[in-house]
Amino acid sequence: MRKFIMTRDINGYNGFGLPFASNMKQIKLTQDVEQTITVPKSNVAGYPNVLAVFSFEPGSMVWVALNQTATAPSGAAVDTYSEALPAARLIEFNAATENNTLSFITKDTSAEIGVAFYAVQ
């Protein structure tokens, strides 16, 4: 797994230019069918956590949950563990979280998703 290291612009400032990840997943969702991805553990010494960087098919609405079942809205306001179209999220690993799972669901006919994983502290 690669470290999360941003490239620098001509003035030396951090930009959001990332190297291609060495650990990526892709899935295609179908309507109302939850799918999961097991988050890979970092194998980089000193970088125990993982940053998941998401990409979603343009125009799709995908709900994502960590270590819970993703749910899509169905009417009235309710408490939820699901988030719509996150850009990137830190996933922590420790003794209590030996395994982490991302759950995805859509109400669309289908939706394509990519997730790139980077090692972070």
Image (tube, helix red, strand yellow):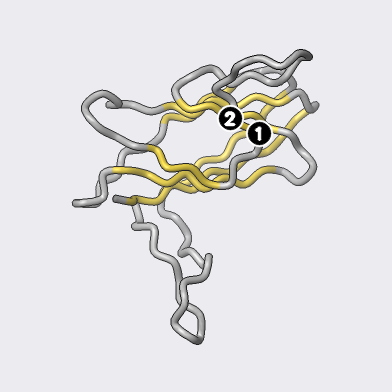
Labels 2 & 1 near each other (Cβ < 8 A): yes
Q: Sequence-wise, which precedes: disc 2 or disc 1? A: 2
Of 4 and 14, nearer the camera is 14
Q: Which residue is mark 2?
A: 64
Residue at (34% x, 37% y) in the render? 92
Where is residue 112, by image quadrant? top right
Disc 1 residue crowd, few under 14, some 14–19, many 20+, Cα 10 Å = some
Q: Is residue 77 left or right of residue 89?
A: right
Where is residue 90, by image quadrant? top left
Residue at (65% x, 34% y) in the render? 84
Q: Position of residue 89 (x, y in %)?
A: 48, 42
Q: Position of residue 104 (x, y in %)?
A: 59, 27
Q: Position of residue 15 (x, y in %)?
A: 51, 70
Amino acid beneath label 2 = Val
Amino acid beneath label 1 = Ala
Residue closest to the far bottom: 10
Q: Is residue 22 left or right of residue 121?
A: right
Q: CA distance from mark 2 to mark 1?
A: 6 Å
Disc 2 residue crowd, few under 14, some 14–19, many 20+, Cα 10 Å = many
- Could you say whether the residue bearing mark 2 is in a helix, strand or loop? strand
- Count of labels in the image: 2
From what the image shows, is residue 24 above or below residue 70?
below
From what the image shows, is residue 32 above or below residue 115?
above
Q: Position of residue 97 (x, y in %)?
A: 30, 26
Q: Is residue 45 left or right of residue 98?
A: left
From what the image shows, is residue 86 above or below residue 22?
above
- Tell me the number on the disc at residue 61: none
- Could you say whether the residue bearing mark 1 is in a helix, strand or loop? strand
- Tell me the number on the disc at residue 84: 1
Residue at (30% x, 44% y) in the render? 42
Of 91 and 1, nearer the camera is 91
Of 66 and 43, nearer the camera is 66
